[in-house]
């Protein structure tokens, strides 16, 4: 059944592939600096490499935006996001899976009665705007640098043309690698904790764990989209918006590649943290935003003439409507899948105020006297509980979210064998893994109970008051790892007859 559910993620990858080549090599193909076949081959190879080697970085932010807890829900959300991309690709408009997957996840949140993390929306939305502006700024600076080089270079025109062609291949490969690392989380990220693949050893040389095999499968679906549907979007990006020369095509590709690298490189993220510099968030950004931003940066650097504003307006409108379209598709599709096909799209979640949860709320420093109206009660909707507590005007939004998280019933049983089978055990330190093994077969009713039990071991404890960006990043990594455990250990309790 898992393979059937995976099809929607692969369809999403197919749609992303239709956009990918235009975003990476569209300008170069339209200026005839590289053929479509060569561009497709280079992009395919390096997208797969980027996904497998460095594809786990940006997935955490999407997980915080909405924690989809049922395979049927993950299937439907991926399908809705893919459908929204497909509609836009048919019209020749470049949109990104990061735009549509966010809209589809919010649709699941609304359908399931869950709250949407506004902080994550702000980070992701800000990254879309930031990626556009960053790519435009980088492209403008590179344009002036290349213009100076050309004006002062004594290189023969034929040699210059050859250098530009080779540079396009190298930079395009770099951009494809960064795209694979940044966007593979959109394609199969929701299936990581249920990966059906076991560790694979090829000839005793190459070893791929279950998650890496999942990323390979997802990246291959992107490759399929590149070879079958990307031609339609290439013209919009490479020619219709603004006429580019071979050199400016190289500038656009390089600016986009740098932007994607900044938002996806875990090594660069760690370097910034160690240097005490606020890092760029590891979030899936839109490669479409990047290439369009780069083209606009070049156009403005050249004086702003010959920009086809009707094409720009059509693209900009699609960036707004694509997430809304995915939201609508997701909400309607979830209703159909749940009620017509009788598939589970969300796990039933109960929020209970009893002695255990109220004591924990008090332990966390909250005034429990204000909970008298809900004490002893249970809620089956996060939104309804939030509205009732908010009406008292005694807690801010973050405090309400913390209280709701404490009361959530989420039955789990520790099963390290399942983690090892899926290859997920490689993501833990030896000390963390040892602490987990000591809890094998232990059951927990609430997430915070498992978190506190693990925190008794130093390797699982977070820093109480993180002061530096490095300490904040450490805590964030622990929280992301715990989220993986919650999903992996969850089980549906048997109903009493």
Image (tube, rainbow, N blue to C red):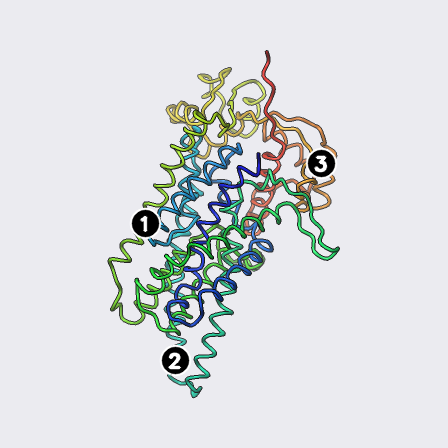
Whole-angstrom CA distance, mark 1 to mark 2, is: 36 Å
User: Looking at the image, which residue is at 47% across and 79% down?
Assistant: 162
Q: In the rendering, at what x and y percent does residue 158 appear?
A: 43, 84
Q: Is residue 35 above or below residue 274?
A: below
User: Looking at the image, which residue is at 45% across and 21% down?
Assistant: 370
Whole-angstrom CA distance, mark 1 to mark 3, is: 46 Å
- Dot 3: element: helix
First along the sequence among labels 1 and 3? 1
Along the viewing direction, whichever of 310 and 416 lies nearer the viewer: 310
User: Looking at the image, which residue is at 26% across and 65% down?
Assistant: 307
Q: Which quarter of the rendered picture does the N terminus lie within?
A: top right
Residue 227 visible in this rendered orientation of the protein: yes
Whole-angstrom CA distance, mark 2 to mark 3, is: 60 Å
Q: In the rendering, at what x and y percent does residue 175 appear?
A: 49, 62
Q: Which quarter of the rendered picture does the C terminus lie within?
A: top right
Mark on residue 318? 1
Which residue is denoted by mark 3 in the rendering? 417
- Dot 2: element: helix
User: Looking at the image, which residue is at 31% across and 53% down?
Assistant: 316
First along the sequence among labels 1 and 2? 2
Along the viewing direction, whichever of 48 and 466 lies nearer the viewer: 48
Mark on residue 5? none
First along the sequence among labels 2 and 3? 2
Along the viewing direction, whichever of 18 and 190 lies nearer the viewer: 18
Along the viewing direction, whichever of 122 and 48 lies nearer the viewer: 48
| Mark 2 Cα-neighbour bin, 10 Å: few <14, some 14–19, many ≥20 | few
Q: In the rendering, at what x and y percent does residue 476 appear?
A: 56, 44
The quadrant holding residue 164 is: bottom left
Which residue is denoted by mark 2 in the rendering? 148
């Amino acid at each position: 059944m898992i393979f059937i559910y995976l099809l929607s993620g692969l369809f999403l990858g197919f749609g992303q592939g239709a956009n990918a080549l235009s975003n990476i090599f569209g300008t170069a193909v339209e200026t005839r600096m590289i053929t479509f076949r060569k561009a497709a081959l280079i992009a395919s190879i390096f997208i797969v490499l980027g996904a497998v080697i460095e594809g786990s970085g940006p997935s955490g932010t999407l997980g915080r935006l909405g924690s989809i807890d049922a395979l049927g829900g993950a299937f439907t959300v991926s399908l809705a996001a893919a459908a929204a991309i497909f509609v836009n690709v048919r019209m020749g408009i470049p949109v990104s899976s990061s735009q549509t997957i966010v809209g589809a996840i919010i649709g699941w949140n609304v359908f399931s009665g869950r709250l949407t993390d506004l902080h994550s929306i702000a980070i992701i939305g800000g990254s879309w705007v930031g990626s556009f502006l960053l790519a435009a700024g980088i492209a403008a600076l590179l344009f002036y640098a290349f213009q100076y080089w050309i004006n002062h270079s004594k290189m023969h025109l034929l040699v210059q043309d050859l250098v530009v062609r080779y540079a396009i291949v190298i930079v395009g490969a770099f951009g494809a690698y960064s795209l694979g690392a940044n966007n593979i989380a959109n394609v199969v990220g929701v299936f990581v904790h249920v990966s059906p693949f076991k560790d694979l050893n090829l000839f005793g040389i190459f070893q791929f764990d279950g998650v890496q095999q999942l990323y390979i499968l997802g990246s291959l679906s992107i490759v399929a989209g590149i070879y079958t549907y990307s031609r339609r979007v290439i013209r919009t990006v490479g020619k219709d918006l603004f006429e580019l020369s071979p050199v400016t095509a190289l500038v656009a590709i390089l600016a986009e590649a740098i932007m994607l690298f900044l938002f996806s490189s875990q090594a660069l993220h760690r370097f910034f943290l160690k240097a005490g510099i606020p890092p760029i968030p590891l979030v899936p950004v839109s490669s479409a935003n990047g290439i369009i931003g780069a083209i606009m940066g070049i156009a403005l650097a050249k004086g702003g003439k010959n920009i086809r504003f009707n094409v720009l307006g059509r693209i900009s409108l699609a960036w707004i409507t694509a997430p809304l379209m995915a939201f609508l598709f997701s909400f309607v599709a979830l209703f159909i899948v749940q009620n017509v096909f009788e598939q589970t799209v969300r796990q039933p979640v109960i929020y209970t105020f009893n002695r255990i949860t109220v004591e924990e709320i008090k332990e966390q420093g909250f005034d429990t006297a204000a909970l008298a109206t809900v004490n002893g009660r249970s809620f089956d909707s996060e939104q309804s509980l939030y509205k009732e507590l908010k009406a008292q005007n005694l807690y801010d939004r973050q405090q309400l979210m913390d209280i709701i998280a404490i009361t959530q019933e989420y039955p789990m049983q520790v099963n390290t064998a399942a983690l090892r089978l899926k290859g997920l055990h490689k993501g833990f330190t030896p000390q963390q893994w040892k602490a987990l093994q000591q809890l094998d077969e232990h059951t927990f009713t609430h997430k915070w109970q498992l978190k506190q039990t693990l925190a008794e071991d130093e390797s699982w404890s977070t820093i109480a008051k993180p002061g530096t960006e490095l300490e904040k990043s450490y805590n964030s990594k622990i929280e992301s790892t715990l989220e993986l455990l919650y999903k992996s250990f969850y089980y549906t309790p048997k109903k009493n007859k």
